[in-house]
Amino acid sequence: MALPKYKMSRANTRTRRSTWKAKAAQTITCPNCGAPTLAHVACPSCGSYRGRVYREAIRSAHTK
């Protein structure tokens, strides 16, 4: 297994790690009910995906 030959400075370590960032999940508005949903996932409010209802809603539209 490879090991570092020299100590890496804090600046170089932090510069290298600065590119590893978590991105926020992309949300879209549901065309059926208008609630924000994840892309390519059935809507949690109304249960529809691409114009078809696949399941019952997990939570009702009136709960927060």
Image: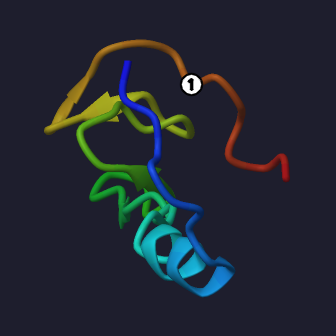
Q: Disc 1 marks which residue?
A: 57
The residue sitting at the top extreme is 55
Count up the numbered dots: 1
Residue shown at the point (45%, 63%) measured from the top left = 20
Q: Position of residue 6 (x, y in %)?
A: 50, 59
- In the image, residue 18 sits, relative to residue 17, either above or below, namely below
Nearest the viewer among 48 and 23 is 23
Q: Residues within 10 Å of mark 1 (few under 14, many from 20)?
A: some
Q: What residue is drawn where x is 43% and y is 28%?
A: 47
Image quarter of the N terminus: top left
Q: Residue at x 27, y 59 (%)?
A: 31
Q: Is residue 61 left or right of residue 38?
A: right
Residue 48 located left or right of residue 61: left
49 or 39: nearer the eye? 39
Q: Position of residue 23 (x, y in %)?
A: 46, 65
In this rendered view, identify the residue nearer to me: 6 or 46: 6
When the figure is inspected, residue 42 is found, relative to residue 10, above or below; the finding is above
* Of the pair 13 and 37, the residue shown nearer to us: 13
The x, y position of residue 33, in whole percent, is 43, 55
Residue at (67% x, 79% y) in the render = 10
The picture places residue 51, in percent across and down from the top left corner, at: 15, 38
Q: Quadrant of residue 41?
A: top left
* Coloring applied to the structure: rainbow
Q: Amino acid at mark 1?
A: Ala
Secondary structure of the residue carrying numbered label 1: loop
In the picture as drawn, the residue positioned furthest to the right comes out as 64
> Can you say whether 30 is above or below 63 in the image?
below
Report the residue that reaches farthest toward the front.
Answer: 5
